[in-house]
């Protein structure tokens, strides 16, 4: 799948951080020495904007995660625990046993690229900036879960952040550690002197709170558009120059682990679609590229490129065929079950994502790998929905559908066509839906695939309830709440405000899935899956397990989506110039290669 960053509406972006240049370099010495030029792409963001600022919050900036953009810590790809990290700006951290606070100890020799030390004041300022841009750990919504109530500078290298325990979240520490850090001496003017008082006021109710939230939103717009005159970074690199074709970064000699940073320079190449990435990889131009979907013939060409090396690991995400249950006949569970039996998931995965996915064993709402951890032997009790035409026809008949002249119709005899929507450029999704279309038509179900201009429009229109059927990313681990809120959160009618769960009717409050507020689960009776999902937000792992099982059964029996394939994190590397790549199944594979470099893994080939 082509990875696209979310598009955020802004008032005009400011001008470039660095002067544009038509040149590039392959200088092996570079700034600060090292092992030459490391070439890559930003797989999360196609297109280099030469006028974008070196601003980690800007949606089209030239701030590259793990290279010149730094976080307090880098989240590990753990199966079940969201609060494990690799060091970043922080060298270590202490999380309170009840998750009420996190104390962060900064790198003792951490410095900015201009030589000034990284301090606790930088961190506090950065956390304030995060609040203006909608960070979950600093949300201004009254009663939001996992919100920091206080940021205390303990000493120049120590910060303590306390959680508001009125509505706690098990992901609180992650919300703090997964925060950008920028230098206060460059960014400090963006926060007014009374900012922290405004932030506290914004979490209340009434006119004063409304005014405080408006003020913070206005600050946030300035933060998103801010363009530092020079890239001052605490990461392994700083931005040297950028043009429409590439961005060049050079080694930061003041980085805390600079002696172990091998590449002297990093070049990000521009691309607009998967095809360009395929060509780069086939030509051996990239030292690293993150997951990019490719058909089998293209994958074989990539594998045959000199030095080509592919690393695979766990990716906590799956793709599901999601139904708008407010539209007939998808309001009938037997129709959804019939489609689940009719669609051969193995065939779909082989066609659409042979290297980047494994066919889902069943629909549970959880990626198969962590499902074993959460559900244990109970996984085997879930209905697998193996491809079975006879069972599909039985379910359709149970739903009252009719088969006339080899074609299935609605119960009243009117035509039925499964209309699936997909964003343009998502090559694996398009291939998958075309294959599903063929399978359905072969078995008497009329179907069509409708392409949408781009992903932001797709998300906007699916949320507005314009689609009958579309693809929806699910199973977003490792936090249990995150996994199931994709099925039983706002998109299906449930919102969790101040610890209280409310349900909106289909078509209201972002509810486009249109599922019932209560569902029958065999062995448990009627349950409210949204309320159960909300409980996961503060549950311990042991408390979460029985809830996860009930929700997995609900997803399996009620089928708000058909889980098609679980993603495999496929990384493309090249061994011609550098060595030290992560091993197969390494938890580092969910992090950008800049983090691998700054941790000292990557070495120049001798």
Image (cartoon, grey):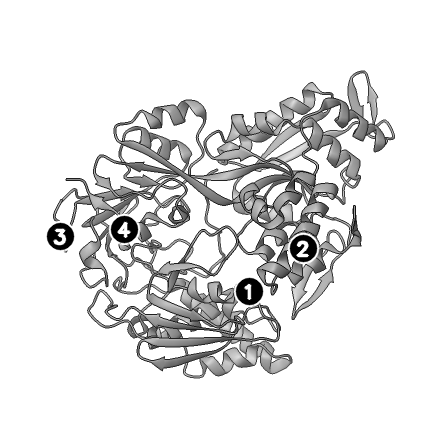
The circle drawn on residue 170 is 1
Residue lying at 25% horizontally and 63% vertically, measured from the top left = 230
State the separation of the CA atoms marked 1 and 2.
17 Å
Nearer the camera: disc 1 or disc 2: 2
Circle 1 Cα neighbour tier, 10 Å, few/some/many (<14 / 14–19 / ≥20)? many
Q: Which residue is mark 3?
A: 33
State the separation of the CA atoms marked 3 and 4.
14 Å
Whole-percent x and y of residue 228? 30, 65
The answer to whether the residue labelled 3 contacts the one labelled 4, judged by CB atoms less than 8 Å apart, is no
Q: Which residue is mark 2?
A: 546
Question: Does dot 3 land on a helix, a strand or a loop?
Answer: loop
Query: Of all residues shown, which one is farthest toward the top?
Result: 405
Which circle's residue, 4 or 2, is located before the other in the chain?
2
Q: Which residue is mark 4?
A: 597
Q: Quadrant of residue 449?
A: top right
Q: Front-most of 406 and 556?
A: 556
Q: Is residue 342 above or below residue 507?
A: above
State the separation of the CA atoms marked 3 and 2.
54 Å
Whole-percent x and y of residue 207? 62, 81
Nearer the camera: disc 1 or disc 4: 1
Nearer the camera: disc 3 or disc 1: 1
Q: Is residue 4 above or below residue 58?
A: above
């Amino acid at each position: 799948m082509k990875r696209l960053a979310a598009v955020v509406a802004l008032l005009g972006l400011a001008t470039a951080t660095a002067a544009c240049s038509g040149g590039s370099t392959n200088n092996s010495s570079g700034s600060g020495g090292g092992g030459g030029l490391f070439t890559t792409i930003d797989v999360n963001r196609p297109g280099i904007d030469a006028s974008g600022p070196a601003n980690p919050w800007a949606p089209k900036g030239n701030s590259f995660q793990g290279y010149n953009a730094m976080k307090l810590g880098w989240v590990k790809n753990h199966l079940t625990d969201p609060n494990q990290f690799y060091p970043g700006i922080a060298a270590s951290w202490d999380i309170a046993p009840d998750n009420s606070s996190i104390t962060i100890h900064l790198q003792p020799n951490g410095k900015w690229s201009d030589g000034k030390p990284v301090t606790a004041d930088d961190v506090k300022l950065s956390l304030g900036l995060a609040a203006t841009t909608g960070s979950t750990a600093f949300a201004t919504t009254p009663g939001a879960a996992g919100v920091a109530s206080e940021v205390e500078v303990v000493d120049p290298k120590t910060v303590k952040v306390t959680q508001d325990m009125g509505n706690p979240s098990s992901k609180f520490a992650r919300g703090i550690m997964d925060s950008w850090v920028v230098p206060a001496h460059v960014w400090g003017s963006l926060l007014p002197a009374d900012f922290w008082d405004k932030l506290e006021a914004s979490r209340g109710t009434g006119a004063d709170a409304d005014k405080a939230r408006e003020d913070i939103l206005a600050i946030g717009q300035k933060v998103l558009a801010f363009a530092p005159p020079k890239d001052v970074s605490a990461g392994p690199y700083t931005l040297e120059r950028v043009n429409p074709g590439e961005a060049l970064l050079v080694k930061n000699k003041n980085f805390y682990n600079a002696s172990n940073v091998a590449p002297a320079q990093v070049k990000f190449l521009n691309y607009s679609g998967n095809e360009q990435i395929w060509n780069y990889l086939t030509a051996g131009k990239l030292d690293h590229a993150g997951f990019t979907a490719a058909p089998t013939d293209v994958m074989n060409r990539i594998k045959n490129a000199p030095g080509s090396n592919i690393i695979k690991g766990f990716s906590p995400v799956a793709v599901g065929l999601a139904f708008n249950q407010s539209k007939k006949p998808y309001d009938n569970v037997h129709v959804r079950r019939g489609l689940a039996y009719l669609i051969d998931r193995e065939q779909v995965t082989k066609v659409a994502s042979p290297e980047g996915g494994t066919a889902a064993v069943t629909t549970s709402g959880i990626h198969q790998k962590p499902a074993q951890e959460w559900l244990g032997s109970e996984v085997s009790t879930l209905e697998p929905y193996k491809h079975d035409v006879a069972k599909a026809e039985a379910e359709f008949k149970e739903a009252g559908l009719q088969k006339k002249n080899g074609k299935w119709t609605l119960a009243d005899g009117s035509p039925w066509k499964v209309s699936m929507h997909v964003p343009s450029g998502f090559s694996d999704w398009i291939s998958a839906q075309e294959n599903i279309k063929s399978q359905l038509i072969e078995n008497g179900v009329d179907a069509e695939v409708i392409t949408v201009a781009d992903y932001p429009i797709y998300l906007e229109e699916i949320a507005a309830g314009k689609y009958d059927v579309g693809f929806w990313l699910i199973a977003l681990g490792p936090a249990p709440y995150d996994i199931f809120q994709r099925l039983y959160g706002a998109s299906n009618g449930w919102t969790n405000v101040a610890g209280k769960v409310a349900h909106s009717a289909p078509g209201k409050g972002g509810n486009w899935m249109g599922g019932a507020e209560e569902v029958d689960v065999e062995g448990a009776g009627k349950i409210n899956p949204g309320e159960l999902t909300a409980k996961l937000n503060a549950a311990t792992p042991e408390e979460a397990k029985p809830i996860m099982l009930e929700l997995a059964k609900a997803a399996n029996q009620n089928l708000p989506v058909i889980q098609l394939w679980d993603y495999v994190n496929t990384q493309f590397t090249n061994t011609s110039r550098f060595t030290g790549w992560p091993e197969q199944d390494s938890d580092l594979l969910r992090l950008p290669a800049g983090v691998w470099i700054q941790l000292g893994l990557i070495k120049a080939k001798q």
